[in-house]
Amino acid sequence: MQRKVFWLTYGALGLIADLALPLWWALAALIPIGVVSWWIAYRSEWF
């Protein structure tokens, strides 16, 4: 379950960043998006 939540949030936030930001900014935003997705899935205890 946690892995599914991680990939869903990572994909959704990555898609939003890809649409909202220029290419290089979107690529650079993937690192913080990964950290946020990891926190949501594994550390927040929401799931």
Image: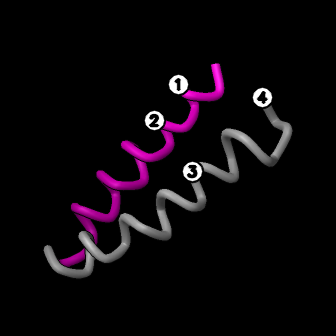
Total labels drawn: 4
Q: Are marks 2 and 1 in contact (CB under 8 Å)?
A: yes
The residue beneath circle 3 is 37
Callout 3: 10 Å neighbours few (<14), some, many (20+)? many
* Residue 11 appears left or right of 47: left
Disc 2, SS: helix
Disc 3, SS: helix
First along the sequence among labels 4 and 2: 2
* Residue 36 appears left or right of 43: left
First along the sequence among labels 4 and 3: 3
Rendered location of residue 17, percent (x, y): 32, 64
The residue beneath circle 4 is 47
The residue beneath circle 1 is 4
Q: Of the numbered discs in the image, which one, if any, rests on residue 7? A: 2
Q: Are marks 2 and 3 in contact (CB under 8 Å)?
A: yes
Q: Callout 1, which amino acid?
A: Lys
Q: Quadrant of residue 24?
A: bottom left
- What is the distance, in whole Å, between disc 4 and disc 1 at their CAs? 10 Å
